[in-house]
Image (spheres, rainbow, N blue to C red):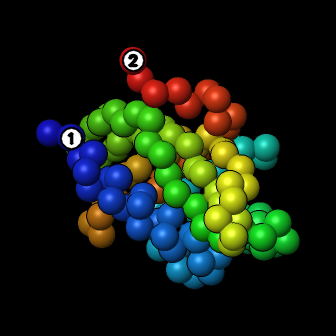
Amino acid sequence: MSAQPTVIQVLTDYYTAFSTLDVHAFLPYFHEPCLLIGPATFAAPTHAVLATAFVTPIQDLRARGFGRSELSVRQTNMLSDTAELVTGVAIRYKADGQELERVGVTYVMHKNATGWKIAVLVLHDADKSKKAA
């Protein structure tokens, strides 16, 4: 049985928390440890270490007038009872509602005793996140 609705709700809640740009609001959505893969790779054994990876991106988003972001899910794939792969596009908006950018995202979600968490986040070209045929 797919965990898709539950996993997508967790990611939706994460995007709401991320939109505050308050690192303490969105860190609980990440598994300990977790891995971020983008222009650089960052392995974080704890939330305290993970918080350091978000300092520069948050400063950059604030400087560009970030208002909120939302996830457009393209594909999900249940890998096991405790792992689900979610690919989509993070759509970021300015505070005035204009679109700021689109970023391709792939999440490996892991289920532990406290629920579904982001274990791996991969940032990539948004055009590589096509909807499944």
For badge 1, the amino acid type reads Ser
Residue placed under numbered mark 1 in the picture: 2
Could you tell me residue 26's position as x and y percent? 53, 73
In the rendering, which numbered label is found on residue 66?
Answer: none
Q: Is residue 33 above or below residue 59?
A: above
Q: Are the residues at dot 2 and dot 1 in contact (C-beta closer than 8 Å)?
A: no
Mark with earlier residue (2, 1): 1
Q: Name the side, left or right, on which 13 lies relative to 55.
A: left
In the rendering, which numbered label is found on residue 133?
Answer: 2
Residue shown at 53% from the left, 80% from the top: 25
Q: Is residue 83 above or below residue 96?
A: above
Residue shown at 48% from the left, 38% from the top: 87
Could you tell me residue 3's position as x and y percent? 23, 47
Q: Secondary structure at mark 2?
A: loop
User: Quadrant where the C terminus lies?
Assistant: top left
Q: How many marks?
A: 2
Could you tell me residue 112's position as x and y percent? 31, 60
Q: Is residue 122 above or below residue 132?
A: below
For badge 2, the amino acid type reads Ala
User: Quadrant where the N terminus lies?
Assistant: top left
